Amino acid sequence: MIDRFVDYERIGGAPFNFASHIKQIGWPVRFLTRIGDDAYGRQILQRLEDSGFQAEDVQIDPHHPTGLVNVTLADGGVPQFEICRDAAYDYLDLSQFPGVDLSAAQLIYFGTLAQRTSRGYRQVQSLLERTSPATCGFCDINLRPPHINPEAIQASLQHTDILKLNTEELKHISAMFNGPRNEPDAIDWLMQTYDISQMALTLGAQGSKVITAGRTITSPPVKIDTIVDTVGAGDAYAAVYAAGYLKNLPMPRILALATDFAARICGLPGAVPSGTAPYRILRQILEP
């Protein structure tokens, strides 16, 4: 999709941001998407090809436009999103990627916005049901009212090994499914109910923490001189977290790297840096 800010536009969407980061870090990735047959779609396709993504993983929709999100920034660069409906990605056909070997995937990253419609929900869940039990399911919750599908959230949690969400999303999900209201109990309830092995909980200005196997590891926020916008910070965090997990690094090290990279993204316009310089150190540590 295209993120349209007041003064500029950027290619965005959590899956694109995640895929771009982890590819720049050095991991092989397949990014499955659908764009419109329009100027924005051609812009996205060119960016993907220039970045080394495979063109056969991009479906062209002749009837629906490329996804658009209007972004306004509140104090501190905190974004508010207006997501346009009936976009090309709402019609993504995940049965039409014969070159993708799901059995070979070490990790599959998925979210909830692509499942906002009943069609999108069925497509994503069908894909998840075809993955190998050995594949790590990394679910990145993105609750953007009114684009919330409780059925899709509950089904996605069934396929989740690593869950990333923020404190407001934790409260919302716990209330949605009649779970505990206080945070520690809600965390325990969610992980036990859905057999989630790791939870990455982002805390905004307070940093983040990871809960795994009865252990909680916290990371304070990293201060930067100037915040341009916070769009995509969570996606940057998720990508470094996933790379660290695949690299089998110690959790405190993963958390420190993810927190630092997310902070640096806040100092840039949009969600994905131009060029490879911001990834140089990460590649030395995290590439396979």
Image (cartoon, rainbow, N blue to C red):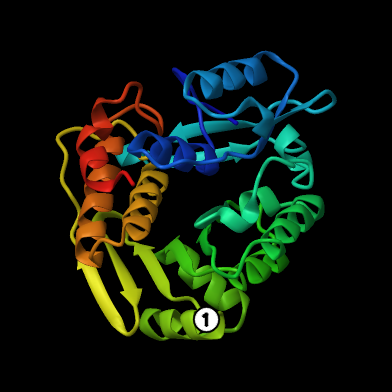
Query: Is 87 positioned to the left or the right of 157 in the image?
Result: right
Q: Give the answer, above or below, for where 202 lies relative to 42.
A: below
Indicate the secondary structure of the residue bearing disc 1: loop
Q: Give coordinates of residue 1: x percent, y percent.
A: 60, 31
Query: Mark 1 packing: few (<14 Cα in 10 Å), some, or many (20+)?
Result: some
Q: Give coordinates of residue 58: x percent, y percent.
A: 67, 30
Query: Is 37 positioned to the left or the right of 157 in the image?
Result: right
Query: Is 11 positioned to the left or the right of 116 in the image?
Result: left
Whether residue 75 is visible here, answered yes or no, is: yes
Q: Mark 1 belongs to which amino acid? A: Asp
Q: Nearer the viewer, residue 259 or 124?
A: 124
Question: Which residue is drawn at the image coordinates 78% and 57% (left, top)?
Answer: 122
Whether residue 142 is visible here, answered yes or no, is: no
Q: Give coordinates of residue 90: x percent, y percent.
A: 74, 41
Give the mark count: 1
| Residue located beneath label 1 in the image | 195
Q: Nearer the viewer, residue 179 or 287?
A: 287
Question: Which residue is drawn at the image coordinates 70% and 55% (left, top)?
Answer: 124
Q: Give coordinates of residue 160: x percent, y percent.
A: 55, 68
**Farthest-out residue, top:** 39
**Farthest-out residue, right:** 63
Query: Is 18 positioned to the left or the right of 158 in the image?
Result: left
The image quarter containing residue 200 is bottom left
Question: Which residue is drawn at the image coordinates 79% and 47% (left, top)?
Answer: 95
Q: Give the answer, above or below, for where 284 lies relative to 270.
A: below
Question: Which residue is drawn at the image coordinates 57% and 54% (left, top)?
Answer: 104
The image quarter containing residue 265 is top left
